[in-house]
Amino acid sequence: MIGIDFILDILSNIFLIVGLFFVFLGMLGLIRLPDVYNRLHTTTKIGTLGAFGVMLSILLKVGFSAMGLKAVTIGLFLLLTAPVAAHMIARAAHRHGVDLCDESIIDEYCDSYDK
């Protein structure tokens, strides 16, 4: 008979592997993508999802102890702040004249302010 501890260990390992995979994809996007806006997109979306997966894995591994609650708090903090920070960095880069890559088609910020 399979115990609940065994199932939680399996789920924890699955979330850890998925989280690390997304963190790896975020790093790969940081290296491979052409401009600052695409790099911000990949590191924010994929990196945050990966970090949250790792934090969820920690929660499943240690339970609702002090470390597990800290992991949940860090994960929620990342989910709430990383998209806002990336948006502000992209806006500041655009206002300072950082160009989009040649393959970009639409620039929705160009009409929102005077350069």
Image (cartoon, rainbow, N blue to C red):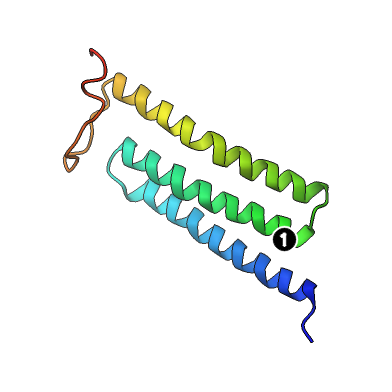
Name the image quarter holding residue 107: top left
Q: Residue at x 74, y 62 (%)?
A: 61
User: Residue 59: where, in percent of width, then height?
Assistant: 72, 55
Q: Which residue is mark 1?
A: 60
User: Residue 70: where, in percent of width, then height?
Assistant: 74, 44
Q: Residue furthest right?
A: 65
Badge 1 density bin: few <14, some 14–19, many ≥20, Cα 10 Å: many
- Quarter of the image with the C terminus is top left
**Is 49 rendered above or below residue 82?**
below
Q: Residue at x 60, y 68 (%)?
A: 14
Secondary structure, mark 1, is: helix
Query: Is residue 113 toward the left or the right of residue 54 in the image?
Result: left
Q: Residue at x 54, y 34 (%)?
A: 81
User: Residue 1: where, in percent of width, then height?
Assistant: 79, 87
Tally of numbered tags? 1
Query: Is residue 49 toward the left or the right of residue 5 in the image?
Result: left
Q: Residue at x 31, y 47 (%)?
A: 33
Q: Amino acid at mark 1?
A: Leu
Q: Residue furthest top?
A: 114
**Is 72 rendered above or below residue 24?**
above
Name the image quarter holding residue 93: top left
User: Residue 108: where, in percent of width, then height?
Assistant: 24, 30
Q: Nearer the viewer, residue 112 or 18?
A: 112
**Is 110 rendered above or below residue 115?**
below
